[in-house]
Image (cartoon, rainbow, N blue to C red):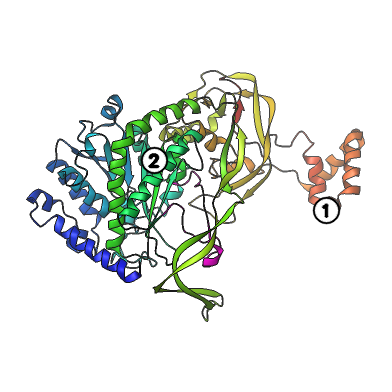
Amino acid sequence: MGHRLIQLAGLAFAALGAATATAADTPKAAALETVAERSGFRITGRYGEVERLCLAFAQAYPQAARCTEFGRTPEGRPMLALVMSKSGALTPQDARERNIPVTLMQGGIHAGEIDGKDAGLLAAREMLSGKLAPRALESFVFVFVPVFNADGHERFGRWNRPNQNGPEEMGWRVTSQNLNLNRDYTKADAPEMQAMLRLLEAWDPVLYVDLHVTDGAEFEYDVANLLEPIYMGDTELRTAGRAALDDLNQALTAQGSLPLDFYPSFADTDDPQSGFTVGAYSPRFSTGYWPLHNRFALLVETHSWKDYPTRVRTTHNTIVKLFEMTAQHGREWRKLMRAADERAERLAGQEVALDFQAGPHTRTIDFRGYAYTRTPSEISGVLVTRYDATKPQIWRVPLRDTIIPKLTVRAPLGGYVVPPAYAAIIGERLSVHGVRFQRLDKAVQGAAVESFRASSATFAPAPFEGRTPATLAGQWREERRDLPPGSLFVPVSQPGARLVLTLFEPLAPDSFAAWGFFNASFEAKEYMEPYVAEQVAKEMLASDPAIAAEFARRLAQEPEFAKNPAARLEFFYRRHPSWDERQNLYPVLRVKEKP
Protein backbone atom coordinates (compact mmCIF):
# COMPACT_ATOMS: atom_id res chain seq x y z
CA MET A 1 0.00 0.00 0.00
CA GLY A 2 1.52 3.33 -0.98
CA HIS A 3 1.82 6.37 1.25
CA ARG A 4 -1.07 8.15 -0.53
CA LEU A 5 -3.41 5.21 0.03
CA ILE A 6 -2.53 5.14 3.72
CA GLN A 7 -3.36 8.83 3.99
CA LEU A 8 -6.70 8.29 2.31
CA ALA A 9 -7.47 5.42 4.66
CA GLY A 10 -6.69 7.70 7.56
CA LEU A 11 -8.97 10.41 6.29
CA ALA A 12 -11.75 7.87 5.84
CA PHE A 13 -11.33 6.80 9.45
CA ALA A 14 -11.45 10.44 10.54
CA ALA A 15 -14.79 10.86 8.83
CA LEU A 16 -16.03 7.60 10.33
CA GLY A 17 -14.89 8.64 13.79
CA ALA A 18 -16.78 11.91 13.59
CA ALA A 19 -19.86 10.08 12.38
CA THR A 20 -19.89 7.64 15.29
CA ALA A 21 -20.89 10.35 17.72
CA THR A 22 -23.12 12.52 15.54
CA ALA A 23 -25.13 10.54 13.01
CA ALA A 24 -28.23 9.01 14.59
CA ASP A 25 -26.38 8.49 17.87
CA THR A 26 -27.80 9.37 21.25
CA PRO A 27 -26.98 12.60 23.09
CA LYS A 28 -25.16 10.32 25.56
CA ALA A 29 -22.71 9.26 22.85
CA ALA A 30 -22.26 12.82 21.63
CA ALA A 31 -21.36 13.93 25.15
CA LEU A 32 -18.60 11.31 25.20
CA GLU A 33 -17.08 12.45 21.92
CA THR A 34 -13.40 13.47 21.99
CA VAL A 35 -11.70 16.56 20.66
CA ALA A 36 -9.82 14.27 18.27
CA GLU A 37 -13.03 12.95 16.73
CA ARG A 38 -14.55 16.40 16.34
CA SER A 39 -11.39 17.60 14.57
CA GLY A 40 -11.22 14.64 12.21
CA PHE A 41 -8.21 13.37 14.20
CA ARG A 42 -6.22 16.47 13.39
CA ILE A 43 -5.68 17.49 17.02
CA THR A 44 -5.83 15.80 20.41
CA GLY A 45 -7.37 17.14 23.61
CA ARG A 46 -5.64 18.36 26.74
CA TYR A 47 -5.62 16.43 30.02
CA GLY A 48 -8.73 18.23 31.21
CA GLU A 49 -10.63 16.24 28.59
CA VAL A 50 -9.50 12.98 30.23
CA GLU A 51 -10.73 14.24 33.59
CA ARG A 52 -14.09 15.26 32.10
CA LEU A 53 -14.66 12.11 30.06
CA CYS A 54 -13.63 9.71 32.82
CA LEU A 55 -16.38 11.11 35.04
CA ALA A 56 -18.80 11.37 32.12
CA PHE A 57 -18.41 7.68 31.27
CA ALA A 58 -19.15 6.72 34.88
CA GLN A 59 -22.23 8.95 34.93
CA ALA A 60 -23.49 7.74 31.56
CA TYR A 61 -23.02 4.03 32.39
CA PRO A 62 -23.27 3.81 36.20
CA GLN A 63 -23.69 0.02 36.20
CA ALA A 64 -20.77 -0.65 33.88
CA ALA A 65 -18.17 2.09 34.34
CA ARG A 66 -16.30 3.72 37.18
CA CYS A 67 -13.74 6.53 37.22
CA THR A 68 -11.01 5.99 39.81
CA GLU A 69 -8.05 8.08 40.90
CA PHE A 70 -5.06 5.88 41.68
CA GLY A 71 -2.39 8.50 42.33
CA ARG A 72 -1.21 12.09 41.96
CA THR A 73 1.59 13.39 39.78
CA PRO A 74 4.37 15.61 41.16
CA GLU A 75 2.51 18.62 39.71
CA GLY A 76 -0.69 17.56 41.46
CA ARG A 77 -2.72 16.11 38.59
CA PRO A 78 -5.01 13.17 39.31
CA MET A 79 -3.96 9.87 37.73
CA LEU A 80 -7.18 8.39 36.40
CA ALA A 81 -8.31 4.91 35.40
CA LEU A 82 -11.61 4.18 33.68
CA VAL A 83 -12.87 0.78 34.88
CA MET A 84 -15.42 -0.93 32.64
CA SER A 85 -17.26 -4.22 32.92
CA LYS A 86 -20.77 -5.62 32.51
CA SER A 87 -19.87 -8.62 34.65
CA GLY A 88 -20.81 -6.86 37.89
CA ALA A 89 -17.13 -6.64 38.90
CA LEU A 90 -15.90 -3.05 39.12
CA THR A 91 -13.40 -3.40 41.97
CA PRO A 92 -10.24 -5.51 42.26
CA GLN A 93 -11.82 -7.50 45.08
CA ASP A 94 -14.90 -8.26 42.97
CA ALA A 95 -12.72 -9.44 40.08
CA ARG A 96 -10.63 -11.72 42.32
CA GLU A 97 -13.58 -13.23 44.18
CA ARG A 98 -15.50 -13.93 40.97
CA ASN A 99 -12.47 -15.07 38.98
CA ILE A 100 -13.05 -12.39 36.34
CA PRO A 101 -10.03 -11.78 34.07
CA VAL A 102 -8.71 -8.22 33.80
CA THR A 103 -6.97 -6.35 30.99
CA LEU A 104 -5.17 -3.16 32.02
CA MET A 105 -4.24 -0.82 29.20
CA GLN A 106 -2.36 2.47 29.30
CA GLY A 107 -1.80 5.29 26.87
CA GLY A 108 0.64 8.15 27.07
CA ILE A 109 3.47 6.64 29.10
CA HIS A 110 5.37 8.76 26.58
CA ALA A 111 2.84 11.56 26.38
CA GLY A 112 3.75 12.67 22.88
CA GLU A 113 2.85 9.19 21.62
CA ILE A 114 -0.81 9.74 22.32
CA ASP A 115 -2.66 7.46 19.86
CA GLY A 116 -3.75 5.17 22.68
CA LYS A 117 -5.66 7.87 24.55
CA ASP A 118 -7.93 8.80 21.64
CA ALA A 119 -8.28 5.25 20.33
CA GLY A 120 -9.04 3.89 23.79
CA LEU A 121 -11.69 6.49 24.61
CA LEU A 122 -13.41 5.82 21.29
CA ALA A 123 -13.29 2.05 21.79
CA ALA A 124 -14.56 2.41 25.37
CA ARG A 125 -17.63 4.31 24.21
CA GLU A 126 -18.34 1.80 21.47
CA MET A 127 -17.98 -1.11 23.89
CA LEU A 128 -20.16 0.40 26.60
CA SER A 129 -22.88 1.36 24.10
CA GLY A 130 -22.85 -2.15 22.63
CA LYS A 131 -21.84 -0.92 19.19
CA LEU A 132 -18.75 -3.16 19.07
CA ALA A 133 -18.17 -6.59 20.66
CA PRO A 134 -21.47 -6.18 22.54
CA ARG A 135 -21.05 -9.17 24.89
CA ALA A 136 -17.32 -8.91 25.57
CA LEU A 137 -17.56 -6.76 28.69
CA GLU A 138 -19.76 -9.41 30.30
CA SER A 139 -16.69 -11.66 30.50
CA PHE A 140 -13.85 -9.44 31.70
CA VAL A 141 -12.87 -6.14 33.30
CA PHE A 142 -11.19 -3.45 31.23
CA VAL A 143 -9.06 -0.96 33.20
CA PHE A 144 -8.00 1.91 30.94
CA VAL A 145 -5.49 4.59 31.90
CA PRO A 146 -5.81 7.12 29.04
CA VAL A 147 -2.66 9.03 30.03
CA PHE A 148 -0.05 7.53 32.35
CA ASN A 149 2.32 10.52 32.14
CA ALA A 150 -0.16 13.32 32.86
CA ASP A 151 2.43 16.01 33.65
CA GLY A 152 4.30 15.26 30.46
CA HIS A 153 1.01 15.39 28.55
CA GLU A 154 0.52 19.01 29.59
CA ARG A 155 3.94 20.07 28.34
CA PHE A 156 2.14 20.60 25.06
CA GLY A 157 3.78 21.70 21.83
CA ARG A 158 3.96 21.32 18.06
CA TRP A 159 7.48 19.91 17.82
CA ASN A 160 7.54 17.59 20.82
CA ARG A 161 7.71 14.63 18.43
CA PRO A 162 9.72 15.81 15.41
CA ASN A 163 9.64 12.34 13.81
CA GLN A 164 5.87 11.94 14.16
CA ASN A 165 3.13 12.74 11.62
CA GLY A 166 0.42 14.34 13.81
CA PRO A 167 -1.48 15.33 15.79
CA GLU A 168 -0.74 19.03 15.42
CA GLU A 169 0.31 19.33 19.07
CA MET A 170 1.12 16.71 21.66
CA GLY A 171 2.70 16.19 25.06
CA TRP A 172 6.30 15.52 26.12
CA ARG A 173 8.14 12.22 26.40
CA VAL A 174 9.11 12.37 30.08
CA THR A 175 7.60 13.44 33.39
CA SER A 176 7.86 16.79 35.14
CA GLN A 177 10.82 15.28 37.03
CA ASN A 178 12.44 14.49 33.65
CA LEU A 179 12.09 10.74 34.19
CA ASN A 180 11.23 8.30 31.41
CA LEU A 181 8.55 6.10 32.93
CA ASN A 182 9.33 3.30 30.50
CA ARG A 183 12.77 2.95 32.04
CA ASP A 184 11.50 3.02 35.63
CA TYR A 185 9.68 -0.26 36.24
CA THR A 186 12.27 -1.94 38.46
CA LYS A 187 13.81 1.08 40.19
CA ALA A 188 10.35 2.70 40.59
CA ASP A 189 11.68 6.18 41.39
CA ALA A 190 8.81 8.19 39.88
CA PRO A 191 5.65 8.76 41.96
CA GLU A 192 3.67 7.95 38.81
CA MET A 193 5.38 4.57 38.52
CA GLN A 194 4.81 3.73 42.16
CA ALA A 195 1.12 4.49 41.65
CA MET A 196 0.98 2.33 38.51
CA LEU A 197 2.69 -0.61 40.21
CA ARG A 198 0.14 -0.44 43.03
CA LEU A 199 -2.64 -0.38 40.43
CA LEU A 200 -1.17 -3.45 38.72
CA GLU A 201 -0.80 -5.24 42.04
CA ALA A 202 -4.41 -4.44 42.95
CA TRP A 203 -5.99 -5.58 39.67
CA ASP A 204 -3.48 -8.33 38.70
CA PRO A 205 -4.35 -8.16 34.98
CA VAL A 206 -3.82 -11.21 32.80
CA LEU A 207 -2.86 -8.79 30.05
CA TYR A 208 -1.04 -5.46 30.47
CA VAL A 209 -1.04 -3.35 27.30
CA ASP A 210 1.31 -0.40 26.72
CA LEU A 211 0.37 1.83 23.75
CA HIS A 212 3.22 3.65 21.96
CA VAL A 213 4.32 5.19 18.66
CA THR A 214 7.73 4.18 17.33
CA ASP A 215 10.23 6.34 15.48
CA GLY A 216 12.42 4.99 12.71
CA ALA A 217 12.69 4.54 8.97
CA GLU A 218 9.89 4.91 6.44
CA PHE A 219 8.25 1.64 5.42
CA GLU A 220 4.77 0.27 4.74
CA TYR A 221 4.10 -1.49 8.05
CA ASP A 222 1.79 0.47 10.34
CA VAL A 223 2.18 -1.33 13.68
CA ALA A 224 4.55 -3.61 15.57
CA ASN A 225 3.14 -5.78 18.36
CA LEU A 226 5.49 -7.45 20.83
CA LEU A 227 4.18 -9.79 23.49
CA GLU A 228 5.86 -11.60 26.37
CA PRO A 229 6.28 -14.29 27.54
CA ILE A 230 7.41 -15.50 24.15
CA TYR A 231 11.18 -15.19 24.45
CA MET A 232 11.53 -14.84 28.23
CA GLY A 233 9.70 -15.64 31.46
CA ASP A 234 7.81 -18.82 32.25
CA THR A 235 8.53 -21.29 29.45
CA GLU A 236 5.09 -22.92 29.57
CA LEU A 237 3.35 -19.58 29.04
CA ARG A 238 5.26 -18.95 25.83
CA THR A 239 3.08 -21.17 23.64
CA ALA A 240 -0.06 -19.33 24.71
CA GLY A 241 1.76 -16.02 24.25
CA ARG A 242 2.75 -16.84 20.68
CA ALA A 243 -0.80 -18.00 19.88
CA ALA A 244 -2.24 -14.75 21.27
CA LEU A 245 0.17 -12.59 19.27
CA ASP A 246 -0.50 -14.51 16.06
CA ASP A 247 -4.26 -14.20 16.61
CA LEU A 248 -3.96 -10.43 17.08
CA ASN A 249 -1.78 -9.85 14.05
CA GLN A 250 -3.89 -12.06 11.79
CA ALA A 251 -6.99 -10.07 12.74
CA LEU A 252 -5.25 -6.76 12.04
CA THR A 253 -4.02 -8.05 8.69
CA ALA A 254 -7.60 -8.97 7.75
CA GLN A 255 -8.58 -5.37 8.54
CA GLY A 256 -6.01 -3.92 6.17
CA SER A 257 -3.10 -3.32 8.52
CA LEU A 258 0.46 -4.52 8.06
CA PRO A 259 1.57 -5.68 11.53
CA LEU A 260 5.02 -6.87 12.58
CA ASP A 261 5.94 -9.13 15.48
CA PHE A 262 9.36 -7.56 16.07
CA TYR A 263 10.52 -4.00 16.71
CA PRO A 264 11.57 -2.53 13.33
CA SER A 265 14.80 -0.86 14.39
CA PHE A 266 17.75 -1.42 12.08
CA ALA A 267 20.66 -3.47 13.37
CA ASP A 268 22.88 -0.59 12.20
CA THR A 269 21.28 2.80 12.66
CA ASP A 270 19.90 4.30 9.43
CA ASP A 271 21.04 1.40 7.20
CA PRO A 272 18.13 -0.67 5.84
CA GLN A 273 20.43 -3.38 4.49
CA SER A 274 21.65 -4.18 8.00
CA GLY A 275 18.26 -5.74 8.70
CA PHE A 276 16.62 -6.38 12.03
CA THR A 277 17.09 -8.25 15.28
CA VAL A 278 14.39 -9.63 17.55
CA GLY A 279 14.75 -8.64 21.17
CA ALA A 280 13.58 -9.46 24.67
CA TYR A 281 12.98 -6.35 26.73
CA SER A 282 14.71 -5.91 30.05
CA PRO A 283 12.51 -5.33 33.11
CA ARG A 284 12.99 -1.55 33.13
CA PHE A 285 10.38 -1.63 30.33
CA SER A 286 6.71 -2.57 30.73
CA THR A 287 7.06 -5.47 28.30
CA GLY A 288 9.93 -6.94 30.27
CA TYR A 289 8.54 -6.22 33.72
CA TRP A 290 5.02 -7.67 33.85
CA PRO A 291 6.03 -11.13 32.53
CA LEU A 292 8.16 -11.47 35.69
CA HIS A 293 4.77 -11.69 37.44
CA ASN A 294 3.83 -14.60 35.11
CA ARG A 295 1.37 -12.48 33.14
CA PHE A 296 1.12 -11.29 29.52
CA ALA A 297 2.49 -7.90 28.54
CA LEU A 298 1.87 -6.42 25.09
CA LEU A 299 3.75 -3.50 23.55
CA VAL A 300 1.86 -1.80 20.71
CA GLU A 301 3.97 0.48 18.51
CA THR A 302 2.18 2.24 15.69
CA HIS A 303 4.50 3.78 13.11
CA SER A 304 5.21 7.48 13.48
CA TRP A 305 5.31 8.21 9.73
CA LYS A 306 1.66 7.20 9.30
CA ASP A 307 -0.79 10.06 9.78
CA TYR A 308 -2.68 10.42 13.04
CA PRO A 309 -6.07 9.12 11.74
CA THR A 310 -4.36 5.99 10.42
CA ARG A 311 -2.49 5.40 13.66
CA VAL A 312 -5.59 5.89 15.81
CA ARG A 313 -7.55 3.54 13.56
CA THR A 314 -4.88 0.87 13.87
CA THR A 315 -4.68 1.27 17.65
CA HIS A 316 -8.47 1.24 17.90
CA ASN A 317 -8.69 -2.01 15.92
CA THR A 318 -5.99 -3.50 18.13
CA ILE A 319 -7.89 -2.58 21.29
CA VAL A 320 -11.16 -4.03 20.03
CA LYS A 321 -9.48 -7.29 19.05
CA LEU A 322 -7.87 -7.49 22.49
CA PHE A 323 -11.33 -7.05 24.04
CA GLU A 324 -12.56 -10.03 22.07
CA MET A 325 -9.50 -12.11 22.88
CA THR A 326 -9.73 -11.45 26.62
CA ALA A 327 -13.45 -12.24 26.60
CA GLN A 328 -12.75 -15.52 24.81
CA HIS A 329 -9.52 -16.64 26.47
CA GLY A 330 -9.24 -14.64 29.69
CA ARG A 331 -10.33 -17.41 32.06
CA GLU A 332 -8.07 -19.89 30.31
CA TRP A 333 -5.18 -17.43 30.63
CA ARG A 334 -5.89 -17.09 34.35
CA LYS A 335 -5.60 -20.86 34.80
CA LEU A 336 -2.32 -20.93 32.90
CA MET A 337 -0.98 -18.05 34.98
CA ARG A 338 -1.94 -19.58 38.31
CA ALA A 339 -0.05 -22.71 37.25
CA ALA A 340 2.92 -20.47 36.33
CA ASP A 341 2.72 -18.88 39.81
CA GLU A 342 3.00 -22.34 41.35
CA ARG A 343 6.02 -23.17 39.18
CA ALA A 344 7.66 -19.89 40.18
CA GLU A 345 7.33 -20.82 43.85
CA ARG A 346 9.53 -23.83 43.10
CA LEU A 347 12.40 -21.93 41.44
CA ALA A 348 14.61 -22.02 44.54
CA GLY A 349 17.90 -23.72 43.67
CA GLN A 350 17.18 -23.72 39.92
CA GLU A 351 19.01 -22.02 37.07
CA VAL A 352 17.06 -18.94 35.96
CA ALA A 353 17.82 -16.69 32.98
CA LEU A 354 17.77 -12.98 33.88
CA ASP A 355 19.18 -11.32 30.76
CA PHE A 356 18.90 -12.17 27.08
CA GLN A 357 20.47 -11.44 23.72
CA ALA A 358 19.87 -12.26 20.08
CA GLY A 359 21.06 -15.69 19.01
CA PRO A 360 23.23 -16.31 15.97
CA HIS A 361 20.49 -17.77 13.74
CA THR A 362 19.69 -15.45 10.83
CA ARG A 363 17.22 -15.72 7.98
CA THR A 364 16.48 -13.46 5.04
CA ILE A 365 13.04 -11.85 4.95
CA ASP A 366 11.04 -9.84 2.44
CA PHE A 367 10.36 -6.51 4.12
CA ARG A 368 7.90 -4.01 2.64
CA GLY A 369 9.81 -0.76 2.52
CA TYR A 370 10.24 2.10 0.06
CA ALA A 371 12.90 2.94 -2.47
CA TYR A 372 15.77 4.81 -0.88
CA THR A 373 19.20 6.27 -1.50
CA ARG A 374 22.21 6.56 0.81
CA THR A 375 24.37 9.52 -0.01
CA PRO A 376 26.93 11.62 1.92
CA SER A 377 25.46 14.54 3.79
CA GLU A 378 26.82 18.05 3.41
CA ILE A 379 25.61 18.73 6.93
CA SER A 380 26.82 15.79 9.01
CA GLY A 381 29.38 14.35 6.64
CA VAL A 382 28.03 10.79 6.97
CA LEU A 383 25.81 8.65 4.77
CA VAL A 384 22.16 9.65 5.07
CA THR A 385 19.19 7.53 3.99
CA ARG A 386 16.44 9.27 2.03
CA TYR A 387 13.18 7.48 1.27
CA ASP A 388 10.76 7.86 -1.62
CA ALA A 389 7.36 6.98 -0.19
CA THR A 390 5.80 6.99 -3.68
CA LYS A 391 7.79 3.87 -4.62
CA PRO A 392 7.08 0.76 -2.53
CA GLN A 393 9.97 -1.66 -2.61
CA ILE A 394 10.66 -5.11 -1.17
CA TRP A 395 13.85 -5.19 0.85
CA ARG A 396 15.64 -8.54 1.12
CA VAL A 397 17.27 -8.13 4.54
CA PRO A 398 18.56 -10.33 7.37
CA LEU A 399 16.56 -10.99 10.53
CA ARG A 400 18.26 -12.47 13.59
CA ASP A 401 15.22 -14.32 14.86
CA THR A 402 16.17 -16.17 18.05
CA ILE A 403 16.79 -15.17 21.65
CA ILE A 404 19.25 -16.89 23.98
CA PRO A 405 20.13 -16.30 27.66
CA LYS A 406 22.93 -13.83 28.33
CA LEU A 407 22.95 -14.13 32.13
CA THR A 408 21.79 -17.19 34.06
CA VAL A 409 21.98 -17.50 37.84
CA ARG A 410 21.21 -20.25 40.31
CA ALA A 411 18.46 -19.05 42.63
CA PRO A 412 19.23 -19.29 46.34
CA LEU A 413 17.47 -22.04 48.25
CA GLY A 414 16.02 -19.60 50.77
CA GLY A 415 16.20 -16.01 49.64
CA TYR A 416 17.91 -12.69 50.27
CA VAL A 417 18.62 -10.71 53.42
CA VAL A 418 18.63 -6.90 53.25
CA PRO A 419 20.46 -5.20 56.15
CA PRO A 420 18.65 -2.66 58.37
CA ALA A 421 20.55 0.24 56.81
CA TYR A 422 18.66 -0.35 53.54
CA ALA A 423 15.47 -1.86 54.94
CA ALA A 424 13.38 1.30 54.62
CA ILE A 425 14.07 2.19 50.99
CA ILE A 426 14.21 -1.41 49.72
CA GLY A 427 11.15 -2.40 51.74
CA GLU A 428 9.22 0.48 50.19
CA ARG A 429 10.19 -0.63 46.69
CA LEU A 430 9.35 -4.28 47.40
CA SER A 431 5.91 -3.25 48.63
CA VAL A 432 5.05 -1.40 45.42
CA HIS A 433 6.32 -4.39 43.42
CA GLY A 434 4.03 -6.74 45.34
CA VAL A 435 7.03 -8.75 46.60
CA ARG A 436 6.59 -10.53 49.94
CA PHE A 437 9.18 -10.05 52.68
CA GLN A 438 9.53 -10.40 56.44
CA ARG A 439 11.39 -8.37 59.04
CA LEU A 440 13.77 -10.19 61.41
CA ASP A 441 12.89 -9.42 65.05
CA LYS A 442 16.01 -10.98 66.54
CA ALA A 443 19.67 -11.01 65.67
CA VAL A 444 21.14 -14.15 64.13
CA GLN A 445 24.78 -14.74 65.05
CA GLY A 446 27.14 -16.43 62.62
CA ALA A 447 24.50 -17.29 60.03
CA ALA A 448 25.56 -19.39 57.06
CA VAL A 449 25.22 -17.03 54.08
CA GLU A 450 26.52 -16.28 50.62
CA SER A 451 28.11 -12.86 50.16
CA PHE A 452 29.07 -11.07 46.97
CA ARG A 453 32.24 -9.00 46.93
CA ALA A 454 32.80 -6.98 43.77
CA SER A 455 36.11 -7.62 42.07
CA SER A 456 35.38 -4.47 40.09
CA ALA A 457 32.74 -1.76 40.14
CA THR A 458 32.40 0.54 37.15
CA PHE A 459 30.13 3.56 37.34
CA ALA A 460 28.48 5.17 34.33
CA PRO A 461 30.33 8.35 33.26
CA ALA A 462 27.07 10.32 33.22
CA PRO A 463 23.73 10.03 35.04
CA PHE A 464 20.99 7.96 33.44
CA GLU A 465 17.37 8.44 34.48
CA GLY A 466 18.48 10.38 37.53
CA ARG A 467 20.85 7.68 38.78
CA THR A 468 24.46 6.62 38.34
CA PRO A 469 24.27 3.00 37.15
CA ALA A 470 26.93 0.54 38.30
CA THR A 471 28.34 -2.47 36.50
CA LEU A 472 29.75 -5.04 38.90
CA ALA A 473 31.93 -8.11 38.51
CA GLY A 474 32.37 -10.76 41.18
CA GLN A 475 30.78 -13.90 42.55
CA TRP A 476 28.93 -15.27 45.54
CA ARG A 477 30.99 -17.05 48.24
CA GLU A 478 29.87 -18.99 51.28
CA GLU A 479 30.78 -17.56 54.67
CA ARG A 480 29.27 -16.75 58.05
CA ARG A 481 27.95 -13.35 59.02
CA ASP A 482 25.78 -11.83 61.71
CA LEU A 483 22.27 -10.77 60.68
CA PRO A 484 21.09 -7.77 62.75
CA PRO A 485 17.50 -7.34 63.92
CA GLY A 486 15.50 -5.22 61.50
CA SER A 487 16.95 -7.01 58.47
CA LEU A 488 14.50 -8.00 55.74
CA PHE A 489 14.20 -11.60 54.57
CA VAL A 490 12.91 -11.86 50.99
CA PRO A 491 12.01 -15.45 50.11
CA VAL A 492 12.50 -16.80 46.61
CA SER A 493 9.51 -19.11 47.04
CA GLN A 494 6.77 -16.75 45.90
CA PRO A 495 4.92 -16.16 42.60
CA GLY A 496 7.18 -13.21 41.77
CA ALA A 497 10.37 -15.24 42.15
CA ARG A 498 11.79 -14.06 38.83
CA LEU A 499 11.24 -10.47 39.88
CA VAL A 500 12.97 -11.14 43.23
CA LEU A 501 16.01 -12.53 41.41
CA THR A 502 15.97 -9.62 38.96
CA LEU A 503 15.99 -7.06 41.77
CA PHE A 504 18.64 -8.66 43.98
CA GLU A 505 21.12 -10.46 41.74
CA PRO A 506 23.89 -7.82 41.45
CA LEU A 507 24.88 -8.79 37.90
CA ALA A 508 21.32 -8.47 36.55
CA PRO A 509 21.06 -5.38 34.32
CA ASP A 510 18.02 -3.91 36.10
CA SER A 511 18.81 -4.92 39.66
CA PHE A 512 18.83 -2.50 42.55
CA ALA A 513 22.63 -2.73 42.47
CA ALA A 514 22.82 -1.98 38.75
CA TRP A 515 20.61 1.09 39.22
CA GLY A 516 22.96 2.45 41.88
CA PHE A 517 20.96 1.86 45.07
CA PHE A 518 24.12 0.53 46.77
CA ASN A 519 26.85 2.61 45.11
CA ALA A 520 28.27 3.80 48.43
CA SER A 521 29.23 0.20 49.22
CA PHE A 522 31.73 0.30 46.36
CA GLU A 523 33.48 3.51 47.39
CA ALA A 524 36.60 3.73 49.55
CA LYS A 525 35.81 5.76 52.69
CA GLU A 526 39.01 5.40 54.73
CA TYR A 527 42.62 5.49 53.58
CA MET A 528 46.22 5.20 54.72
CA GLU A 529 48.61 8.09 54.07
CA PRO A 530 51.63 7.07 51.93
CA TYR A 531 54.14 7.84 54.66
CA VAL A 532 52.18 5.60 57.05
CA ALA A 533 51.88 2.89 54.42
CA GLU A 534 55.63 2.96 53.85
CA GLN A 535 56.27 2.24 57.53
CA VAL A 536 53.53 -0.41 57.70
CA ALA A 537 54.99 -2.13 54.63
CA LYS A 538 58.44 -2.33 56.14
CA GLU A 539 57.05 -3.88 59.30
CA MET A 540 54.96 -6.43 57.37
CA LEU A 541 57.87 -7.43 55.14
CA ALA A 542 60.02 -8.00 58.20
CA SER A 543 57.42 -9.95 60.20
CA ASP A 544 55.54 -11.99 57.58
CA PRO A 545 57.59 -14.14 55.13
CA ALA A 546 54.48 -15.08 53.12
CA ILE A 547 53.62 -11.43 52.43
CA ALA A 548 57.25 -10.74 51.54
CA ALA A 549 57.31 -13.64 49.09
CA GLU A 550 54.02 -12.60 47.44
CA PHE A 551 55.21 -8.99 47.09
CA ALA A 552 58.46 -10.13 45.49
CA ARG A 553 56.60 -12.42 43.10
CA ARG A 554 54.29 -9.63 41.92
CA LEU A 555 57.20 -7.24 41.42
CA ALA A 556 58.94 -9.82 39.25
CA GLN A 557 55.95 -11.07 37.26
CA GLU A 558 53.60 -8.06 36.96
CA PRO A 559 55.28 -5.06 35.30
CA GLU A 560 52.24 -2.83 35.63
CA PHE A 561 52.11 -3.51 39.35
CA ALA A 562 55.83 -2.88 39.70
CA LYS A 563 55.51 0.53 37.96
CA ASN A 564 52.51 1.67 40.05
CA PRO A 565 53.52 3.19 43.43
CA ALA A 566 49.92 3.43 44.66
CA ALA A 567 49.23 -0.22 43.84
CA ARG A 568 52.40 -1.30 45.64
CA LEU A 569 51.37 0.54 48.81
CA GLU A 570 47.79 -0.71 48.55
CA PHE A 571 49.13 -4.27 48.47
CA PHE A 572 50.10 -3.83 52.11
CA TYR A 573 47.13 -1.68 53.11
CA ARG A 574 44.70 -4.42 51.99
CA ARG A 575 46.49 -6.88 54.28
CA HIS A 576 46.54 -4.55 57.27
CA PRO A 577 43.87 -4.66 60.04
CA SER A 578 42.85 -1.07 59.17
CA TRP A 579 41.56 -2.13 55.73
CA ASP A 580 37.75 -1.69 55.44
CA GLU A 581 36.40 -5.25 55.37
CA ARG A 582 33.11 -4.02 53.93
CA GLN A 583 34.53 -2.17 50.93
CA ASN A 584 33.14 -3.65 47.70
CA LEU A 585 30.90 -5.96 49.75
CA TYR A 586 27.40 -6.03 48.29
CA PRO A 587 25.20 -5.43 51.36
CA VAL A 588 22.53 -7.97 50.41
CA LEU A 589 23.20 -11.60 51.38
CA ARG A 590 21.83 -14.90 50.12
CA VAL A 591 20.66 -17.61 52.52
CA LYS A 592 19.62 -21.25 52.14
CA GLU A 593 16.68 -20.96 54.51
CA LYS A 594 14.70 -18.39 56.44
CA PRO A 595 16.91 -17.07 59.28
Secondary structure under the numbered disc 2 in the rendered image: helix
Which amino acid, by three-letter code, is at mark 2? Answer: Gln
Mark 2 surroundings within 10 Å by alpha-carbon count, few (fewer than 14), some (14 through 19), many (20 or more): many
Image location of residue 301, percent across then percent down = 39, 55
Q: Nearer the viewer, residue 468 or 385?
A: 385
| Location of the N terminus (image quadrant) | bottom left
Q: Does the magenta stretch include residue 459?
A: no
Residue 398 position, x and y percent, is: 55, 60
Left or right placement of residue 384 versus residue 78 in this view? right
The residue sitting at the bottom extreme is 378
Residue sitting at x 36%, y 31%: 332
Question: On the image, numbered disc 1 is attached to which residue?
Answer: 560
Question: Within the image, what quadrant is residue 289 found in?
Answer: top left
Q: Main secondary structure of the magenta part?
A: loop
Residue 332 seen by the camera: yes
Near mark 1 (Cα within 10 A), the count class, few <14, some 14-19 or many ≥20, is few
Q: Residue at x 27, y 57 (%)?
A: 313
Query: What's the amino acid at mark 1?
Result: Glu
Q: How far apart are marks 2 and 1 (CA)?
A: 48 Å
| Percent x, y of residue 233 | 50, 37
Residue at image mark 2: 194
Q: Residue 202 carries which label?
A: none
Quadrant containing the C terminus in the rendered view: top right
* Any part of residue 583 in sight: no
Q: Which of 335 and 477 is in front in this view?
A: 335
User: Looking at the rendering, which quadrant does residue 137 occupy?
Assistant: top left
Q: Which residue is drawn at 57% across and 38% down?
A: 353
Residue closest to the eye, 530 or 551: 551
- Vertical side of 306 occupied by 202: above or below: above
Task: Specify whether residue 280 is painted magenta.
Answer: yes
Q: Is residue 321 above or below residue 483?
A: below
Q: Is 592 situated above or below 175?
A: above
